[in-house]
Amino acid sequence: MSELTHLDAEGNARMVDVGAKAVTRRVAVASGRIVMSAQAREAIRQGTVQKGDVLATARVAGIMAAKRTGELIPLCHPLGLDSVAIDFAWESDALRVTATAAISAKTGIEMEAITASCVALMTIYDMAKAIDKGMVIDAVRLIAKDGGKSGRWRAAGFEDFEP
C-alpha cells in the first residue's frame, strides 16, 4: 500500500510531506455543468431570479470554496492561492462552470479547481431551485493541470487546451 501517497506503510491515512518538493508554478482547470429547464436558463440569463444575481453569487462562492479546500478535503494541504477564476458558458440545455486555480507552491491545486466548480454549481442550484428543482449537476472533472513533478496533463478531448 505504500505506493499510495496518502497512506503510510501500514495503510493509515496521512497528509503527504511536501517539504522537500520544489516550488513550481501550478495551474489546474476543472469544469462541470448544470442541466436545467428553459425557464430557469432564461431567468438566470435575464437576472430575474428572486434570490439575486445567480452568476455573480456563484462566482464568489466558487472562489471562496477554492480558498477553503484544505478545510473541506481531509488530506489536502491548506494553500494560499495566487488566483481563482470562475467562468460560465451557456450550452443548449445547461450552464457550464469552469474554474481555473493557480499557485506557486510545492503541491498541486487540482482539488481547489474541482471544489470551486462544484460549489459554484451548487450555488446556481440553490439560487434557482424555486424555478426548477429537477436541475442536474453533472460532468464535474479535472480537464487540465500544469506544473509539479507530473508536469502537463490534459483530459481526453482536451489535449490542445491551454488555461
Image (cartoon, grey):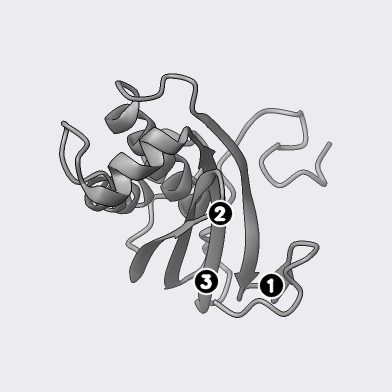
140 lies above or below 143:
above
Left or right, 124 with respect to 34, comes to left
**Three-letter amino acid code at the position of disc 2:** Ser
Residue 58 % position (x, y): 30, 46
Residue 9 % position (x, y): 77, 36
Residue at left offset 78%, top offset 65%: 157
The foreground one among 56 and 69 is 56
Q: Which residue is mark 2?
A: 31
Closest to the camera, between mark 1 and mark 2, is 2
How far separated are the C-alphas under marks 1 and 3? Answer: 13 Å
**Three-letter amino acid code at the position of disc 1:** Lys
Closest to the camera, between mark 2 and mark 3, is 2
Q: Which residue is mark 3?
A: 27
Residue at left offset 72%, top offset 80%: 160
Residue at left offset 61%, top offset 74%: 146
Crowdedness near tag 1: few (<14), some (14–19) or many (≥20) residues, C-alpha within 10 Å: few
Q: Is residue 81 visible?
A: yes
Which mark is on residue 41? Answer: none
The foreground one among 158 and 153 is 158
Sequence-wise first label, 1 or 3? 3
The total number of labels drawn is 3
Q: Are the residues at dot 1 and dot 2 in contact (C-beta closer than 8 Å)?
A: no
Closest to the camera, between mark 1 and mark 3, is 3
Left or right, 101 with respect to 59, comes to right
Q: Which residue is mark 1?
A: 149
